[in-house]
Image (cartoon, rainbow, N blue to C red):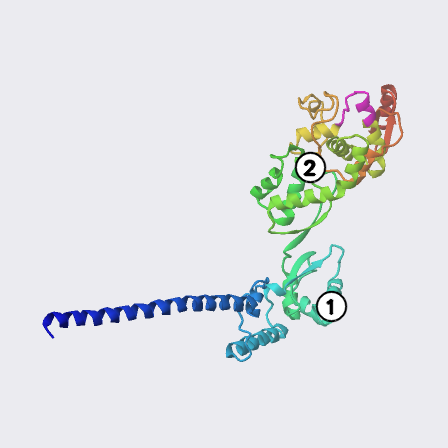
Amino acid sequence: MDNKSIIKFILAIAFLAVSAAGLFVFFSKDKAVPEAEEIQKAGRKENAESPDNTLQTKEIPDTGSPVNEDPNNPAAENAEDQKEDQEDAAQEEGPAEPEDLERFVVALSEETSGQTAKNLLDRGFIKDEAEFLEKLSGRKINAIAPGGYKISKKMDADQIADTLSASPYMKWAVIPEGLRKEEIADFLAQVLKWDAAKREQWIAAYSLDKPEYNEGVYFPDTYLIPVDEDPAAVAKRFIDKFNEKFAPYLVRFNEQNIKWTTGLTLASIVQREAANDADMPLIARILWNRLEREIPMSCDATLQYVRGDEGNGWWAPITLADKKIKSPYNTYLNKGLPPFPICNPGLAAIEAVLDPAESDCLYYLHDADRITRCAETYAEHESNIKAYLQ
């Protein structure tokens, strides 16, 4: 065989080898694709039917830390042991943690430590009244201060005695009817130990944004207030109480076609002008009569409000000079009501405005015994002045 024949033979063998390899790859590839798709399909089907996958679609509560629940896994045993240890620790006596503390209130009416000890026993804070009172006597205090305290059932008698011997974290504030906002601020500053800046924060709270909240809506009541509460939050506490108490009266004002601001302003004047609660319906009727006849109300209380405290107190008697003060609050010079309330009235004054007494009187005065003497005419009023004030 010559050289040319040998070369042709080698090329033919090589071509046959390459062709055979190509056919193997082609048939192998055609078979591999459906196998992969079958595996993927089988995988998707298995995942869809897997209980674990179904659980993942539910809302799982956050336990704070993952826990292995496999009973054959040591980690599961450790987690279960840890949980049991925590439960045992919670049942053991020990120092009180913040979450263990409860509010214990000593009421204003509790005049003796014995009453407080009984309340502590009833609520499960102490086990023996006599033991607690003995511990308390060693603190050399006259009595437990009324207010709110933070104590725990994990505390012993000594720890509770220490806590109740200290100043309470919440203090009682009893606000009488008829005070103006500054007077309430002075009272709160004394009870809650406010400085001048906090006092001013109380006075300014809500007044700038809502002029109708400048006065009248800081409801007179008994409050238990945290000593560290922000003055604006304390103001909101008073307003919330007003909204709660005033709600049924608001309906009645609407039924009588009286704006609530009008009714509240008149109630604040009645509160200051009346000698007592029983006197209020008559004073309310006289003031309504003057308003309806467009006669100046001529109320000293409105002048006292606009004049303020000049050294003799907020409600010191007015003078002839005071009657000349140019102000919308001067009801001697102006007809109608002042623009806003002059104090924070109680419910009796509000009720009197809604349901005044029957009377045609236009004038009144209070005699030396604080009894109201009213008159229908000015001549009768002058006679009352001579009879009861001179």
Instruction: Tell me the SS state at disc 2.
Output: loop
Q: Where residue 42 sits: x, y (%)?
A: 50, 68
Q: Check disc 2 and report the residue beneath it.
A: 180
Quarter of image, res 325: top right
Q: Where residue 358 sits: x, y (%)?
A: 89, 30
Outermost left residue: 2
Q: Where residue 298 sits: x, y (%)?
A: 76, 24
Task: Please indicate, yes or no, whether residue 389 appears anywhere in the rendered image.
Answer: no
Q: CA distance from mark 2 to mark 1?
A: 42 Å
Is 198 situated left or right of 304 in this image?
left
Quadrant into which the N terminus falls: bottom left
Quadrant into which the C terminus falls: top right
Is 62 situated left or right of 20 in this image?
right
**Quick check: 76 above or below 175?**
below
Instruction: Specify the amino acid type for callout 2.
Output: Arg
Give me the residue at 63% from left, 60% from top. Answer: 166
Q: Are marks 2 and 1 in contact (CB under 8 Å)?
A: no
Q: Where residue 322 sits: x, y (%)?
A: 69, 24
Instruction: Tell me the SS state at disc 1.
Output: helix
Instruction: Assess disc 2: are there few (<14), some (14-19) or many (≥20) residues with their C-alpha within 10 Å of its C-alpha.
Output: many
Instruction: Assess disc 1: are there few (<14), some (14-19) or many (≥20) residues with their C-alpha within 10 Å of its C-alpha.
Output: some
Q: Mark 2 or mark 1: name the one nearer the start of the chain.
A: 1
Give me the residue at 60% from left, 72% from top. Answer: 94
**Quick check: 4 above or below 238?**
below
Q: Check disc 1 and report the residue beneath it.
A: 121
Instruction: Specify the amino acid type for callout 1.
Output: Leu
Outermost top residue: 379
Q: Nearer the viewer, residue 136 or 227?
A: 227
Q: Nearer the viewer, residue 302 or 249?
A: 249
Quarter of image, res 270: top right
Quarter of image, res 140: bottom right
Q: Is residue 37 magenta?
A: no
